Image (spheres, grey):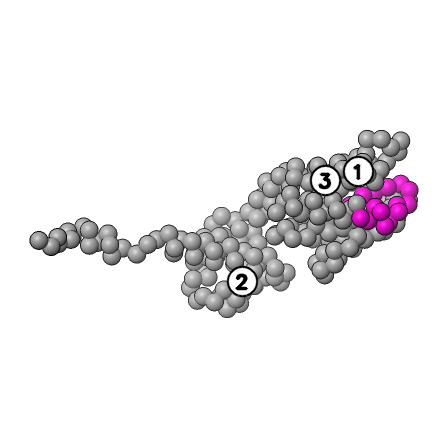
Amino acid sequence: MEAVPTRDAARVDAAPPRGGETSRTLDRGLRLLHLVADAPAGLTVTEAAQRLGIGRAAVYRLVGALSGHGMLRRDGDGRLRLGVGVLHLARRAQPLLAEGALPALRRLAEQAGATAHLTVVEAGEGVALAVVEPSWTSFHVAYRTGARHPLELGAAGRAILAGRAGLAGPVSTAGELQAGAYGVAAPVLGVPGLEASVGVISLAPLAVDPVGRQVAAAAAAIATALS
């Protein structure tokens, strides 16, 4: 005798799987955040819809959910921009970034005999996120964690700008942030969502070739640790 499915069983079989739709919505929301982050002038809803390949109504739904969590906002012209919630998450992540970078920074400071630092981009400026001083030198630069500077000045900022252009080699400067100080830095590449550099700063001129190799090796090690 052939079994006849009950009404409840038929309803369960006909129900569409919801996991795939949820994953697709999450993926679209994350892609929208990345698109807005990569657009300095912000995005219109129409532009976002075109780049995501979805309708404007779907974008409005994503914007509503993300705005509710402070991840997105709309400026006076209605363009989508990142919200303060993203900065909150970034600040929560900073201690983890610093912790992951410390072993390579300690090794670099001892090798170069100079103060080593990890610098990240925050609000368009370079910010010293982690600093390690060498243990064996008589004199070295005291570099404060949290110090900010324009990206156009100093080896750390210039290395980040070089990384944006796809250049991985070390950058050296003299006296740009502080008279009598010398710096060598290299960008940290290959970590999604992170713009950063690793460098050293000294009161005496640095041998660019060997120190540059040490800095580049530290940047690569930190990229591996954070990936």
Q: Distance between the residues labelled 3 and 2?
A: 44 Å
Q: Estimate how packed mark 1 is, as few (under 14), some (14 to 19) or many (20 or more) residues with alpha carbons within 10 Å.
A: many
Q: Position of residue 109 (x, y in %)?
A: 79, 38
Q: Which residue lies furthest to the front in this view?
A: 1
* For residue 72, above or below residue 57: above
Residue occupying image coordinates x 56% and y 57%: 34
Circle 3 — which element? helix
Q: Give the range drawn in magenta.
A: 198-213
Residue at x 45%, y 66% (from the top left corner): 54
Helix, strand or loop at label 1? It is helix
Residue type at mark 1 is: Ala
- Looking at the rendered image, the disc whose residue lies closer to the viewer, 3 or 2, is 3
Residue 166 % position (x, y)? 71, 60
Residue type at mark 2: give it. Answer: Gly
Specify whether 187 is left or right of 59. right
Q: Are marks 3 and 1 in contact (CB under 8 Å)?
A: no
Tag 2's secondary structure?
Answer: loop
Q: Mark 1 points at which residue?
A: 109
Q: Which of 155 and 10 is in front in this view?
A: 10
Q: Earlier in the sequence, mark 3 or mark 1?
A: 3
Between disc 1 and disc 2, whose residue precedes? Answer: 2
**Foreground mark, 1 or 2?**
1
Residue 128 at what x, y percent from top left?
A: 73, 43
Q: Mark 2 points at which residue?
A: 78
The mark that comes first in sequence, 3 or 2, is 2
On screen, residue 215 above or below 28: above
Residue 104 — which label? 3
Q: Is residue 40 positioned above or below 201 on the image?
A: below
Q: How far apart are marks 3 and 1 (CA)?
A: 9 Å
Q: 10 Å neighbourhood of mark 2: few (<14), some, or many (≥20)?
A: few
Give the spatial CA distance, label 1 vs label 2.
48 Å
Disc on res. 185: none
